[in-house]
Image: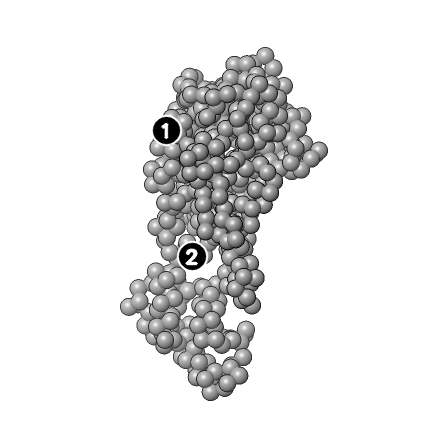
């Protein structure tokens, strides 16, 4: 599953967000993603892709930034058999 | 200057039919209809199998909206739904408008807090072998989650506090809210309580105390029999109940409907035993509530008893009432609505305060259900086995908790 699809699914399931509104330029706060929900989303992401995010990760502001970050980490993890840490 | 405290809003998640509201709830109580059902879970290795009161039709996503509901454990969801209902019932806006809500607050009762969230975490860690938990685990489980959400959603800028005093939690929450309004510290207080005792570990713990009434699919509805010689214990239930307390003149000025008045609040501690109640401690709380309200025993026309249907508790409560009411005891109308809505633990005091104020409002006292055979040890007051319509000027609502903590609310009919 692509990162943006996971974001859409998560925001629909947790916040009843319209998937059509979850586009790269959408601002996460406007979709109802506060700091707690961002932590929960990261948790879900770690689970789904079996990676571990840095604890001091800079919080993305838009759906696009979040998706880019996720895909970079997935690629990094795929390249490194030990996984990203 | 002491202010009068009006009750201007009531809300609950009804164990009968969540969408039906207060009139339906009270009507069913007066008809002696039990909300107790048989609970049989799929927990392993041994399912929960007991009489229980639940709100099976309560849909948190519908009641609160998905984004809000997803940030709460069920106890906070039930509390928030009850709070919204009470707030709407009071005719107050959910959005803070031109009025200053800096002194408005929330005082909430919960005996257990977010036990379902904690239990889910334990299952993840110990059953499924997970190494970490959801980042929301803390904010879902914390005991003050309900009052925190309520204050946020209603824009309440004053005190926001939770009270954990076992079965007296929400009676204490209401009493402390009452004191703040009466003193002038707060103009409006949202108060009440909520709990969900069906977490597997919690229900098993209660079972181990040997105080739960047994029952199956056929017998559960009649399982809770306060004051009866056939009583076999209490029936747990989940629920949320809320009241809006408001400074009297403020309520009058905005044309609010006034259900009744909280006139006094008395507390005490038995200071003798964790689970064995003592009449002397309850007597102190009863007398303190009457004195606080400026009521004499002759002014009180109805008592909503704590009446859990335990072997130990019921006779002690009646003994306390006999001591306090003296020659008036024999004609004092007493009933235990727990016989129908069960024991909601941290929500018990709140749902029973609602029952009491509705009795004053409608001038009809609900009965104790299933009281066919009065235990002679519980005699000496006028037990209502049928609803009774008669003038009710003032009433008491008793909450006597494990730990020996006692709380009594004194209410007056609106006048």
Identify the residue under disc 1.
B27
Q: Position of residue B12 (x, y in %)?
A: 42, 39
Identify the residue under disc 2.
B70
Q: Position of residue A85 (x, y in %)?
A: 54, 79
Q: Position of residue B119 (x, y in %)?
A: 53, 55
Q: Is residue B128 above or below residue B281?
A: below
Quick one: which residue is furthest to the top in this view? B327
Q: Position of residue B359 (x, y in %)?
A: 43, 25
Q: B261 left or right of B207?
A: left
Q: Nearer the viewer, residue A31 or B17?
A: B17
The chain identifier of the residue carrying mark 1 reads B
User: Which image quadrant is residue A5 in?
Assistant: bottom left
Q: B84 left or right of B229?
A: left
The chain identifier of the residue carrying mark 2 reads B
Circles 2 and 1 on the same chain: yes
Q: Nearer the viewer, residue B272 or B391?
A: B272
Rendered residue at 47%/73% (across/down): A46
Q: Say which label, 2 or 1, has the lower sequence index.
A: 1
Q: Secondary structure at mark 1?
A: helix
Rendered residue at 44%/80% (across/down): A74
């Amino acid at each position: 599953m692509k990162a943006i699809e996971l974001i859409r699914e998560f925001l629909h399931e947790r916040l009843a967000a319209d998937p059509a509104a979850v586009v790269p330029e959408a601002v996460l706060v406007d979709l109802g993603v506060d700091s707690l929900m961002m932590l929960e989303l990261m948790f879900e992401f770690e689970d789904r892709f079996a990676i571990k995010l840095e604890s001091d990760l800079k919080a993305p502001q838009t759906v696009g930034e979040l998706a880019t970050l996720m895909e970079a980490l997935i690629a990094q993890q795929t390249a490194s058999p030990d996984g990203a840490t | 200057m002491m202010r009068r405290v009006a009750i201007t809003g009531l809300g609950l998640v009804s164990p009968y039919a969540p969408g039906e509201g207060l009139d339906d709830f009270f009507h069913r109580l007066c008809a002696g209809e039990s909300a107790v059902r048989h609970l049989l879970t799929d927990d392993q290795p041994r399912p929960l199998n007991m009489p229980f009161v639940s709100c099976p039709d309560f849909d948190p996503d519908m009641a609160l909206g998905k984004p809000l509901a997803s940030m709460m454990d069920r106890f906070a969801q039930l509390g928030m739904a009850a709070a919204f209902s009470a707030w709407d019932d009071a005719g107050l806006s959910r959005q803070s408008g031109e009025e200053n809500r800096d002194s408005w607050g929330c005082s909430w009762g919960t005996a257990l807090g977010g036990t379902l969230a904690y239990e889910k975490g334990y299952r993840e860690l110990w059953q499924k072998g997970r190494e970490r938990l959801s980042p929301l685990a803390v904010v879902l489980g914390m005991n003050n989650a309900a009052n925190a959400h309520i204050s946020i959603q209603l824009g309440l800028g004053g005190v926001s506090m939770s009270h954990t005093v076992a079965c007296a939690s929400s009676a204490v929450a209401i009493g402390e809210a009452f004191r703040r309004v009466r003193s002038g510290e707060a103009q409006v207080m949202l108060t009440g309580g909520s709990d969900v005792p069906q977490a597997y570990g919690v229900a098993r713990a209660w079972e181990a105390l040997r105080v739960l009434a047994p029952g199956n699919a056929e017998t559960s509805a009649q399982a809770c029999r306060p004051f009866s010689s056939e009583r076999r214990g209490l029936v747990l239930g989940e629920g949320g109940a809320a009241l809006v307390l408001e400074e009297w003149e403020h309520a009058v000025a905005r044309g609010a409907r006034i259900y009744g008045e909280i006139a006094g609040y008395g507390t005490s501690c038995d200071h003798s035993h964790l689970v064995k109640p003592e009449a002397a401690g309850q007597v102190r709380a009863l007398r303190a509530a009457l004195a606080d309200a400026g009521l004499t025993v002759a002014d009180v026309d109805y008592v909503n008893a704590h009446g859990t249907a335990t072997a130990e508790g019921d006779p002690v409560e009646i003994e306390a009432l006999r001591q306090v009411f003296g020659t008036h005891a024999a004609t004092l109308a007493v009933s235990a609505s727990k016989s129908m809505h069960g024991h909601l633990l941290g929500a018990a005091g709140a749902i029973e305060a609602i029952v009491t104020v509705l009795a004053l409002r409608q001038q009809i006292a609900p009965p104790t259900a299933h009281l066919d055979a009065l235990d002679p040890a519980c005699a000496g007051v006028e037990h209502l086995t049928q609803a009774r319509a008669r003038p009710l000027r003032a009433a008491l609502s008793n909450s006597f908790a494990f730990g020996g903590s006692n709380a009594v609310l004194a209410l007056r009919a609106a006048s």
